Image (spheres, rainbow, N blue to C red):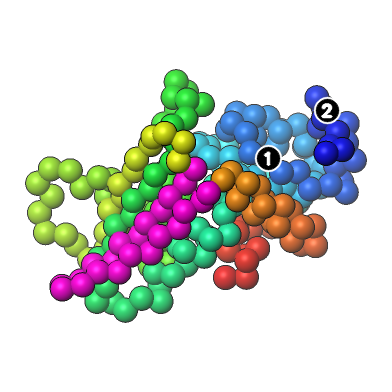
């Protein structure tokens, strides 16, 4: 394909480049430390980052344009802007997410909160902490209005499926997105990089990239 493979990213002309980074949290943090004062545009899709690692991303965005999104799929980012347009009567909401197993974080830290829940909560005017009820197991009692139930499945070679269920008395509405290949995320990342090359320093998400 004519793509050059190198072992030292810092040997590149970073001031005129956009770095696309999908790695482990520790590797992303090391990259940000190594960049130092360089004004390099960054597209970061790494998940599972701790609060201190996310703070490094935020600090980098003071001097550089940064797109930070755990899901680069165009369709899934569109999907989770839709809840705010739905009538109040259908706002009992649950999300189910399926994707393939991973071992990268198994021994180092708990996997990141599902991006789908955070996006949907934001669309409904709630924070992640306000909205999340993971699994709704046991005797949970009456369901409050400000709640999003999350149900997660890992198995096989599923790339990424998201279903958002809105329920009311006598009816329900389901919105579903299915990623057929990991190329879906790569295309979104390249789109983000092209968009980012013309932006001023700041912290952006795919919402800004897509104009949502």
Element type where label 1 sits in the image: strand
Question: Which residue of the protein is positioned furthest toward the top in this rendering?
Answer: 107
Q: Which quadrant of the rendered structure holds the N terminus? A: top right
Q: Which percent across, then down, holds residue 7?
A: 80, 24
Q: Are marks 1 and 2 in contact (CB under 8 Å)?
A: no
Foreground residue among 41 and 192:
192
Does residue 6 appear left or right of residue 212 in this picture?
A: right
Q: Which percent across, then down, holds residue 108?
A: 47, 23
Q: Which residue is mark 1?
A: 21
Q: Which residues are magenta?
A: 159-180
Secondary structure predominantly adopted by residues drawn in magenta: strand
Q: CA distance from mark 1 to mark 2?
A: 15 Å
Question: Which residue of the protein is positioned furthest toward the bottom in this rendering?
Answer: 87
Q: Which quadrant of the rendered structure holds the C terminus? A: bottom right
- Which residue is located at x 27 percent, y 72 percent? 90
Q: Which residue is mark 2?
A: 6
- Which residue is located at x 88 percent, y 31 percent? 11
Specify whether residue 161 is painted magenta: yes
How many C-alpha atoms fall within 10 Å of the one at disc 1: few (<14), some, or many (≥20)?
some
């Amino acid at each position: 394909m004519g793509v050059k493979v190198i072992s030292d990213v810092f040997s590149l002309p970073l001031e005129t480049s956009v770095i696309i980074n999908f790695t482990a949290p520790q590797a992303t943090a090391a990259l940000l430390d190594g960049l130092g004062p360089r004004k390099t545009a960054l597209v970061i899709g790494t998940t599972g980052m701790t609060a201190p690692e996310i703070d490094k991303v935020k600090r980098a965005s003071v001097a550089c344009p940064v797109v930070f999104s755990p899901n680069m799929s165009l369709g899934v980012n569109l999907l989770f802007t839709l809840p705010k347009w739905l009538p109040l009567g259908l706002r009992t909401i649950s999300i189910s997410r399926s994707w393939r197993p991973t071992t990268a974080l198994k021994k180092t830290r708990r996997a990141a909160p599902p991006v789908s829940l955070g996006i949907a909560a934001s669309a409904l005017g709630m924070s992640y902490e306000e909205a999340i009820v993971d699994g709704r197991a046991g005797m949970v009692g009456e369901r409050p209005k400000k709640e999003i139930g999350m149900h997660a499945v890992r198995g096989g070679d599923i790339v990424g499926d998201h279903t958002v269920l809105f329920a009311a008395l006598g009816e329900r509405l389901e919105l579903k997105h299915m990623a057929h290949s990991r190329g879906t995320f790569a295309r979104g990342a390249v789109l983000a990089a092209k968009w980012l090359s013309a932006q001023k320093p700041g912290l952006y998400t795919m919402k800004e990239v897509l104009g949502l």
